[in-house]
Amino acid sequence: MKTSSAFFCLLGSLLLSASASAQDCNRDCLTSHLNTYLDAVTQHTPANGNLWEGFRQTENSVVIPAGQGVWENVTALGSIQRRYFDPLQSQAGYYGTVMMGAEEAVVAIRVKIQWDKVTEAEWFISRKSDVGVNGTGNTPFDLEMLRKTLPAQRVVPPAERSQRELLQAIVNSYFDGITSHNGYIVKGHPGCTRYENGFPTFNSPMREGNDIGNDGKTDCRTQADFGVAIVAIRDFYVIDEESQTVMVSAVFRREAGEERRRNHFTEVFHVDGGKIRDIHAAFYYAPEDRPVPNWAPYDGLFPLPASYR
């Protein structure tokens, strides 16, 4: 009996070790896979992307076969390129721009690595001509401002870093501030900035009685009336402890009766000294019949149109 138990313990240990090895991908490994994938996209050659046989990709929540979508439309990486890495989750993130012919689009990309292959890619794409929050007009977009206020690309000294669990809690405080309509909840520096596709959404006059310590001006802690019932499906897909950067995707679920579309986004948070310093978002407004985020375990969170049965 003891020999049998020892054998199964050893077998289990070997299987766990093999599984861990299959998932192990450090920063250098993630960097190599992300760059290989991006090169394959810009060269329109999925065969060069080191893709897993079961590879899956979405663009603004729509599933795209390898060879279509960005594989056809992206001609080069753009003037803004930021890369972040999370070895614990074997995921890499890209925030910046890509060229789609003559047009430069703001994007955020999540890439997952397993078994030394790229298994998943999720794209958030925003173009200047995209529709606005009510399905009309244009989305917030300011590429020139984004170039002037680039997200940080840095290595923070170990003694100045917050642990990954704290980084996630700090970012969650921002979302809690939105749903609670209470900026005091948000763990942010006074004057912290927020850009949506490069468009600044701060530094406007504060409504009377709501000043929380920024000389009467709004900052990332202060929230407008977004009509948001809850910030749902928060996916912290990159927590980069080295750069103290968090990339998280989520969905603004609107309050009942709201005509504004759901906002599906990635936001890039930089944290200094345990507080948010700046936020850069890439997002789009999802039509009501589109399932978002279209990734398990939340495959199809969307209001069905009245015509559906």
Image: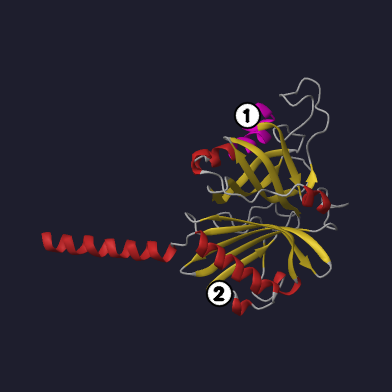
What is the chief secondary structure element of the magenta stretch?
A: helix
* Residue 1 appears in the rendering: no
Percent coordinates x, y for residue 67 in the rendering: 67, 76
For discs 1 and 2, the disc positioned in front in the rendered view: 2
Q: Amino acid at mark 2?
A: Asn
Q: Label 1: which residue? A: 185
Q: Secondary structure at mark 1?
A: helix
Image quarter where the C terminus lies is: bottom right
Please tell me which residue lies in front, 164 or 210.
Answer: 164
Please tell me which residue lies in front, 158 or 69.
Answer: 158
Does 286 sit left or right of 112 as displayed?
Answer: right
Q: Label 2: which residue? A: 50
Percent coordinates x, y for residue 19 in the rendering: 38, 64
Percent coordinates x, y for residue 288 in the rendering: 74, 54
Does 167 sit left or right of 178 as displayed?
Answer: left
Q: Amino acid at mark 1?
A: Ile
Percent coordinates x, y for residue 247 in the rendering: 61, 50
Against 110, residue 175 (above or below) is above
Q: Secondary structure at mark 2?
A: loop
Q: Which of the two discs, 1 and 2, labels the residue nearer the N terminus?
A: 2
- Quarter of the image where one finds residue 298: bottom right
